[in-house]
Image (cartoon, rainbow, N blue to C red):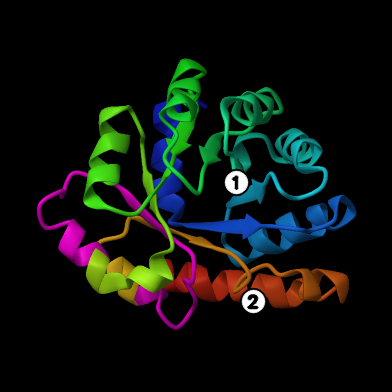
């Protein structure tokens, strides 16, 4: 996929599942549950053991049917590793302009972490495609709405503290997409083999996205 196609698919999918701490052998079942539930975008955080290998195996198994991103990317070295393993997009908890440049160099979507209006605009000026407002739960949907007043042109992904209870509020505030962590995929469900519950949660979030 081209970078434009990746960004459009992220915006169309609306919900990206954040996978942190999941074991490599659990990942195929997690991905299958997410797809059945209607979510076809997943971020594997790089503080998860075997993250690079999981990105590669998912891209091999799903190809363009599934967006696979790398999360918790703090530097260009990790960014390049993720891209070489097949990551479609790269997310960071902070604003690192060199990571944005690396993504643009290789035609991948850059989603840096931002908080303030200054950071949001800086990220866009350096070529970010979507900005990840984090921690969104602490900032609240009202914050997103206020920020979009003067900066309407930005694509915002809300991440951190987003749940089924507030997902609709973030969409109404103007978020184009959401990143969902433990409210969707958590280690307890995976360890207990409750992938049907992950599928049910995915379906519930997909319904909110409509």
Residue 70 vertical position relative to residue 182 in the rendered view, above or below: above
User: Residue 30 sits in which quadrant?
Assistant: bottom right
Q: Nearer the viewer, residue 114 or 179?
A: 114
Span of residues in magenta: 144-168
Q: Position of residue 117 (x, y in %)?
A: 22, 50
Give the crowd class for mark 1: few <14, some 14-19, many >=20 residues within 10 Å.
many
Of the numbered discs in the image, which one, if any, rests on residue 72?
Answer: 1
Residue 9 vertical position relative to residue 1 in the rendered view, above or below: below
Secondary element type, mark 2: helix
Give the crowd class for mark 2: few <14, some 14-19, many >=20 residues within 10 Å.
some
Residue 22 visible from this viewpoint: yes
Residue at x 81% of width, y 59% of height: 29
Residue 63 placement, left or right of 172: right
Q: Position of residue 195 (x, y in %)?
A: 78, 71
Task: Examine the structure image and report whether residue 150 is included in the region drawn in magenta.
Answer: yes
Residue at x 36% of width, y 75% of height: 168
Q: Earlier in the sequence, mark 1 or mark 2?
A: 1
Q: Marks 1 and 2, how far apart in space? A: 26 Å
Q: Position of residue 44 (x, y in %)?
A: 67, 48
Q: Position of residue 139 (x, y in %)?
A: 34, 69
Residue at x 34% of width, y 54% of height: 115
Task: Examine the structure image and report whether residue 114 is included in the region drawn in magenta.
Answer: no
Residue 61 vertical position relative to residue 21 in the rendered view, above or below: above
Residue 68 visible from this viewpoint: no
Secondary element type, mark 1: loop
Residue at x 85% of width, y 56% of height: 23
Of the numbered discs in the image, which one, if any, rests on residue 200?
Answer: 2
Q: Main secondary structure of the magenta part?
A: loop
């Amino acid at each position: 996929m081209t970078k434009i196609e990746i960004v459009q698919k992220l915006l169309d999918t609306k919900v990206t599942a954040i996978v942190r701490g999941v074991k490599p052998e659990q990942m195929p079942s997690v991905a299958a549950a997410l797809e059945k539930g209607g979510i076809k975008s997943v971020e594997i955080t790089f503080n998860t053991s075997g993250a690079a290998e999981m990105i590669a195996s998912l891209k091999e198994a799903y190809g363009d049917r599934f967006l696979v991103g790398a999360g918790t990317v703090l530097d260009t070295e990790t960014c390049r590793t993720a891209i070489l393993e097949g990551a479609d997009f790269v997310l960071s908890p902070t604003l690192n302009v060199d990571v944005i440049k690396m993504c643009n160099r290789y035609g991948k979507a850059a989603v840096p972490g931002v908080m303030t209006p200054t950071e949001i605009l800086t990220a866009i000026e350096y070529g970010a495609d979507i900005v990840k407002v984090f921690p969104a739960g602490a900032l609240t949907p009202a914050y997103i709405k206020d920020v979009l007043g003067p900066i309407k042109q930005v694509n915002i992904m809300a991440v951190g503290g987003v749940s089924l209870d507030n997902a609709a509020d973030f969409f109404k505030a103007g978020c184009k997409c959401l990143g969902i962590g433990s409210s969707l995929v958590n280690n307890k469900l995976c360890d207990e083999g409750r992938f049907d519950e992950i599928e049910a949660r995915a379906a519930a979030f997909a319904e909110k996205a409509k």
